[in-house]
Amino acid sequence: AATSSELLINVARKITWRDVPIFAARNQSFTLSGRIEPMSAVNLNLQSSSSFTSGIKTVQSDANGYFPFSITEKNPGLVRYQVTTPADPRFVASSGDFVTVLIR
């Protein structure tokens, strides 16, 4: 008799940006926001090319998948940001597109 084995399939989450400013003033707070799907409360990491924000900021999305990152950059220049989320039992690690903000 033939037997079948269980096949686990993990899916990537979709991360999209909603509000991203083209430029922001240095030393003043601005917000990058987006949404993750499927909708659920999940931890998200913001990675930045800025030496001031150095490394990763973490927030949790709300139950509808929306998330905000509040950022203050110290130095002028172009800064790239990307949102990522770690793998969990149902989803593989996921990342959104890069966005660039001019800090002036």
Image (tube, rainbow, N blue to C red):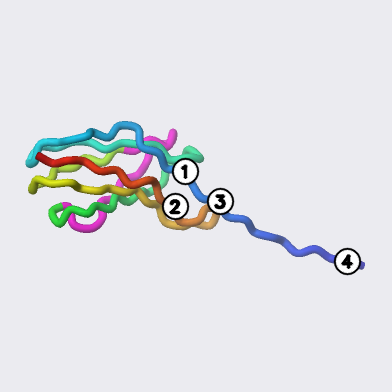
Mark 1 surroundings within 10 Å by alpha-carbon count, few (fewer than 14), some (14 through 19), many (20 or more): few
Q: Nearer the viewer, residue 88 or 9?
A: 9
Residue that carries the numbered disc 4 in the rendered image: 2
In the displayed structure image, the side of residue 3 where residue 5 appears, left or right: left
Question: Which amino acid type corresponds to the residue marked 2 in the rendered image?
Answer: Ser
Q: Is residue 56 magenta?
A: yes
Which of the two discs, 4 and 2, sits closer to the camera?
A: 2
Residue that carries the numbered disc 3 in the rendered image: 11
Q: Earlier in the sequence, mark 3 or mark 2?
A: 3
Mark 4 surroundings within 10 Å by alpha-carbon count, few (fewer than 14), some (14 through 19), many (20 or more): few
Give the structural element (helix, strand or loop) at label 1: strand
Which of the two discs, 1 and 4, sits closer to the camera?
A: 1
Give the structural element (helix, strand or loop) at label 2: strand
Residue that carries the numbered disc 2 in the rendered image: 94
Q: How far apart are the two marked residues, 2 and 1, measured between alpha carbons?
A: 7 Å
Question: Which amino acid type corresponds to the residue marked 1 in the rendered image?
Answer: Lys
Which of the 4 image quarters holds residue 35? top left
Mark 2 surroundings within 10 Å by alpha-carbon count, few (fewer than 14), some (14 through 19), many (20 or more): some
Q: Is residue 3 magenta?
A: no
Q: Earlier in the sequence, mark 1 or mark 4?
A: 4
Q: Earlier in the sequence, mark 2 or mark 1?
A: 1
Q: Where does the image place residue 32, in percent across and percent down from the top left?
A: 27, 38
Q: How far apart are the two marked residues, 4 and 3, measured between alpha carbons?
A: 28 Å
Give the structural element (helix, strand or loop) at label 4: loop
Q: Nearer the viewer, residue 72 or 20?
A: 20
Q: Where does the image place residue 101, in percent across and percent down from the top left?
A: 21, 41
Contact check, label 2 and label 1, Cβ < 8 Å = yes
Question: Which amino acid type corresponds to the residue marked 4 in the rendered image?
Answer: Ala
Residue 1 drawn above or below residue 50: below
Q: Which residues are magenta?
A: 53-67
